[in-house]
Image (spheres, grey):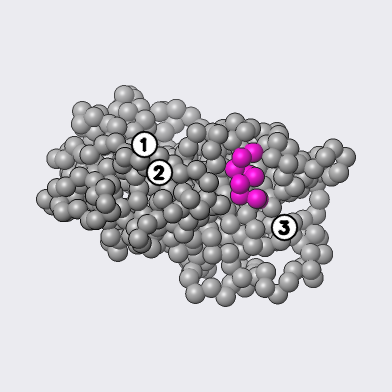
Amino acid sequence: MGTGPQRPSAFATAEEIIVGRARREPHRAALGWRDRTILLGRFAGHVESRAEALEGALARGGAIAQVMSDTPGLVATVLAAWRHGSTAVPLDAASSTAALAARLETSGVAGVVAHEEHVSAVSEALRAAGSRALLLVSRGLRLVDGGRPGRPAGRGSGTRVVDLAARRARRGARDDAGSSAVNEVAFHAYLPEPQSRARAALLTHANVVSSALRTGIARGDASEDVALATGPLWDVQTLVGEVLARLVSGGSIVLPGPGGPREFFERIESHRVTDLSLSAAGAAAVAEAALPSKRAIRSVRKVLLRDPGLMLSLTQKREVADRFPSAEILQSWGRVETTGPIATARQGAAFRKPDVLGTPHPGLVVGIADPDGRLARPGQKGEIVCRGAVVMRSYLAAPAATRETLRDGWLHTGDLGYIDGDGDLASSGGRARGRGPAQD
């Protein structure tokens, strides 16, 4: 599928795995959107065309932000950034100008891809950050050059349509030979901190694929699954755990699109959804909504309550279970710094154990550290720590915070918990003493 940059990398990226599957199974379902389904081969073509546009507009190896609505275009743009050899920086389009500007400046992005409805906010943020990043506007299947809003007026600002393919041909001769190597950092994944802060975890391609595979195994994913992803796609935990994990394992994903509870249940029915993920707020809304048809209910075999699923009472969890009588209720827990979930509760544990976070995912070491940093015995409370292939490389441009969080080979989450008698991870509530965010 096209030429694309050559990647002398020992580790396959999620984009390479998904596009490789598309070559073998182009007619498999990939993404459901509203009342239609995008086949895997066509989706891979969208990824390739966007990567070619990026190649024509931007040098490889930098950071490219996505300020986009939750659509298949956002997923394709993230994969296209990786195919281009760049780092993806998904950002919340609803953020304030100050928050967007801080994140664009911290990441030092070379370009921003935005949906048309977000262009004004992005332009304002680029000007506030004094960024010289190129704005690319997503219009259907095309990327349109939106200029460099961060430059002083009269120096190339303002939206205009240009031939990005021609620009790619002109730029091709100027690319140095070393620029074709893949950037090992997949994401600048920003933490959900107050808007005055801008802290991102550097997540590698190895982190992403490892997390996607482990999450799928722990959840019991299968290639025939059709999953409805309800979390925001700018949240990397959602993007990896709910979308990429499904596409990597061979399943398909449905994005909910606009609408309320009625449209939500209609999409479950029209796409024959088998797996459903819900936040605490989403689960509460489902529990309170009018019952859908029996057909819609009984297609769902698994309902995953995402962190902070512990905010749900046992009564609310049972109300969700009543809506989907054929489904197993699961619960997962993780942090941005672990790329996605590191523990999943199954087999009714969410009902038997009110504080359960889940069984640690295969290949990870999850423990409890006492105040002196020593691993605690089962039943003892302390700070939850983790080691394994899903742990971030570091924070972006924040060495003090990195040293505070990554110590002696362990990621210190700052959350308190314990290991119960069954070997499951459980929450004891609160944060570890003195674990406020370090300042750099």
Q: Amino acid at mark 1?
A: Ser
Furthest residue in direction front, as rendered: 372
Q: Quadrant of residue 98?
A: top right
What residue sits right under mark 1 in the picture? 279
Q: Are marks 1 and 3 in contact (CB under 8 Å)?
A: no
Q: Residue at x 34, y 44 (%)?
A: 414
Q: Residue at x 34, y 25 (%)?
A: 289
The span from disc 1 to disc 2 (Cα, nearest Å) is 12 Å
Q: Residues within 10 Å of mark 3 (few under 14, many from 20)?
A: many
Position of the N terminus by quadrant:
bottom right
Furthest residue in direction right, as rendered: 154
Boundaries of the magenta span: 101-109
Which mark sits nearer the N-terminus, 1 or 2?
2
Residue 228 disc label: 2
Q: Amino acid at mark 3?
A: Leu
Question: Along the line of sight, which residue is nearer the eye, 161 or 326?
Answer: 161
Image coordinates of residue 104 in percent, x first then y, are 63, 44
Q: Residue at x 84, y 45 (%)?
A: 156
Asked if residue 114 shows in the view, the reply is yes
Image coordinates of residue 427 in percent, x first then y, are 24, 41
Say left or right for 265 vs 146. Answer: left
The span from disc 3 to disc 2 (Cα, nearest Å) is 34 Å
Image coordinates of residue 428 in percent, x first then y, are 22, 39
The rendered magenta stretch, by its main secondary structure, is classed as helix
Residue 58 disc label: 3
Which mark's residue is nearer the viewer, 3 or 2? Answer: 3
Q: Residue at x 72, y 57 (%)?
A: 58
Residue 6's place in the image compared with 339, above or below, is below
Q: Amino acid at mark 2?
A: Leu
